[in-house]
Amino acid sequence: MKIQVLIVLFICFIFGNVPEVSAQKENKVEEDAVGMQVLKTHYEKYPLALTTWSRVVNLKNQELYKAKLKVNDSKMEIFYRSNGKIQVELADQGNNIPGDLLAQIDAEMNKYKVRSFTKATYFDKNKVEYLLKIQLRSEVLTKTYDKDFNPLPDRDLNMALGY
């Protein structure tokens, strides 16, 4: 049974269905409990940001630091490795959804509501994706798009990213 679970996780990882930041557990921490390299990287990039911190353990059992902050009225979540390197940055895009993308969604679905539109920058992979969370009747869907807003295969990012 353990072998089967490992094989499934390995396949999901290879094909990108389980992002590396998939949170299993999250514990809020005070800033003085965050590593110096993480703080240095964070405050060099966001010097004036009011930040709340958490420790997160991903599916690879790696400990990451999660920073929640607001920059120019945009909510952000940034996941750092203990060496200070940014693994992924999630930036709320508000209502800045490209018209072509909205037209594409309109053609696919009736009566939906956009819950959130997020830009995900994966620094380790040098990759950008956009996550569009949609309320469709009683279910919530997350649609994923590449940097050029081409659709990517559906996957459950709500659970994987801790949303």
Image (cartoon, rainbow, N blue to C red):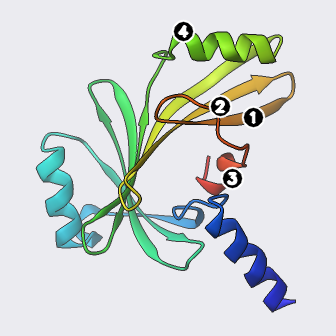
Q: Earlier in the sequence, mark 3 or mark 1?
A: 1
- Marks 1, 4: nearer the viewer: 4
Which amino acid type is shown beneath numbered disc 1? Answer: Leu
Q: Give above or below for 67 relative to 71.
A: below
Which amino acid type is shown beneath numbered disc 2? Answer: Lys
Tags 1 and 2 touching, CB below 8 Å: yes
Q: CA distance from mark 3 to mark 1?
A: 11 Å
- Which quarter of the figure is the N terminus placed in? bottom right
Residue bearing the label numbered 1? 141
Q: CA distance from mark 1 to mark 4?
A: 19 Å
- The crowd level at tag 1 (other Cα within 10 Å; few <14, some 14-19, many 20+) is some
Viewer-closest of 25 and 6: 6
Q: Earlier in the sequence, mark 3 or mark 4?
A: 4
Residue bearing the label numbered 4? 99
Residue 9: which quarter of the image?
Answer: bottom right
Which amino acid type is shown beneath numbered disc 3? Answer: Met
Residue bearing the label numbered 3? 159
Q: Earlier in the sequence, mark 4 or mark 2?
A: 4
Q: Position of residue 39 (x, y in %)?
A: 19, 62
Circle 4: element type: helix
Would you say 26 lies left or right of 9 here? left
Residue 133 is marked as 2
Circle 3: element type: helix
Viewer-closest of 52 and 3: 3
